[in-house]
Amino acid sequence: MHSATLITAHLNAPFGAVLSAQDVVESLRVGRLSAETPQANAVMGYLFVEIEPRLIAACALESGTSVAHAHQLYLDTLDHQAPRSPQWERAVAGQL
């Protein structure tokens, strides 16, 4: 789960150890915010804004899920008032 570790380190940088790699993996697997704490879910809300779509897709595949589940997670973050990610939207356009 190398990509999950990279993602976690980047997202945690401004906050300290709020989010775990398992939080990232589980959220991608189920397609919704599924971190252990509300604070970790809040940090996860910036996944699609802060992380390159290729790394998110790689993490999803390494986690045994699909880009479609990752996109479900993206939609869930929007439902929780996270900012839109035009970069993610362009990356998955026509693939789902």
Image (cartoon, rainbow, N blue to C red):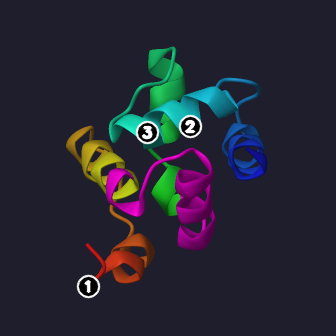
Label number found at residue 23: none
Where does the C terminus fall, quadrant-wise?
A: bottom left
- The magenta segment is 50-69
Kind of element beneath mark 1:
loop
Q: Earlier in the sequence, mark 2 or mark 1?
A: 2
Estimate the x, y position of residue 70 in percent, counting from the top left: 40, 53
Q: Earlier in the sequence, mark 1 or mark 3?
A: 3
Estimate the x, y position of residue 22 in percent, counting from the top left: 62, 28
- Please tell me which residue lies in front, 42 or 61: 61
Residue 45 visible in the picture: yes
* Crowd around label 1: few <14 · some 14–19 · many ≥20 (10 Å): few
Question: For mark 1, what is the residue?
Answer: 94
For the residues bearing labels 3 and 2, Cβ distance under 8 angstroms: yes
* Crowd around label 2: few <14 · some 14–19 · many ≥20 (10 Å): many
Kind of element beneath mark 3:
helix
Q: Is residue 23 left or right of residue 11?
A: left
Question: For mark 2, what is the residue?
Answer: 25
Estimate the x, y position of residue 5 in percent, counting from the top left: 76, 42
